[in-house]
Amino acid sequence: MGAPVLLYMYDLSEGWCRNLGPLCPVNAVWHTSIVIYGKEYVFGSTGITFHDPGKPDKVIELGETDLPPFEFKVYVKELKYTEWTGASYDPFKHNCNHFTDHIARYLGMGPIPECVFTSVDRLRESPFYSKIVDWVTKNGQNQQK
């Protein structure tokens, strides 16, 4: 039996998008992470970090992997110093969601749900787009609870 791979999803708007109802075309602005081997792996402006799992708004079971923990840790360490450095972080083009998608694919889980990526694209349709982006940028930096 393999190790479970979980996608943790945190709503950076903290329910604000959902509360706007029909004025906002999305219910959430997602920040995601991968939980595997008892740790939550996150990518952000400081690069790749890991810690004990937080309390996400939503959890998706992606599957199980037979990859040994040591091999996974070596792979993540390589990523940390190459393509997933803090300096490479971009909130729209190279973010936590791109990282979790990369890790999920590496582990053989396939892509993460498309809704994670499309929420920002759909949010652009809202007249409140700039205000929501400003709010999320100011308040969503350390979203793990």
Image (tube, grey):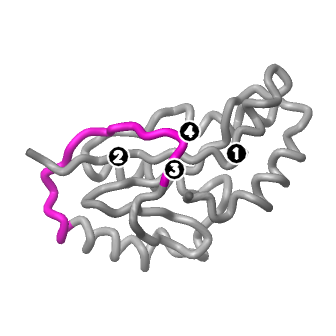
Badge number at residue 34: none
Q: Earlier in the sequence, mark 1 or mark 3?
A: 1
Mark 1: secondary structure = loop
Badge number at residue 6: 2
Q: Amino acid at mark 2?
A: Leu
User: Is the Cβ of the residue at disc 4 closer than 8 Å to that at disc 3?
Assistant: yes
Badge number at residue 14: 1
Q: Which residue is mark 3?
A: 32
Distance from Cα at disc 4 to Cα at disc 3: 8 Å
Q: Which residues are magenta?
A: 55-71
Mark 2: secondary structure = strand
Q: Earlier in the sequence, mark 1 or mark 2?
A: 2
Please determine whether, in this image, residue 107 is positioned above or below residue 84.
above
Task: Pick out the residue farthest to the left.
Answer: 1
Closer to the observer: label 1 or label 4? 1
- Crowding around mark 2 (Cα neighbors within 10 Å: few <14, some 14 to 19, many 20+) is some
**Residue at the spot x=58%, y=70% of the render?**
88
Q: Which residue is mark 4?
A: 116
Please determine whether, in this image, residue 44 is positioned above or below residue 95.
below
Viewer-side residue, 14 vs 128: 14
58 to the left or right of 21: left
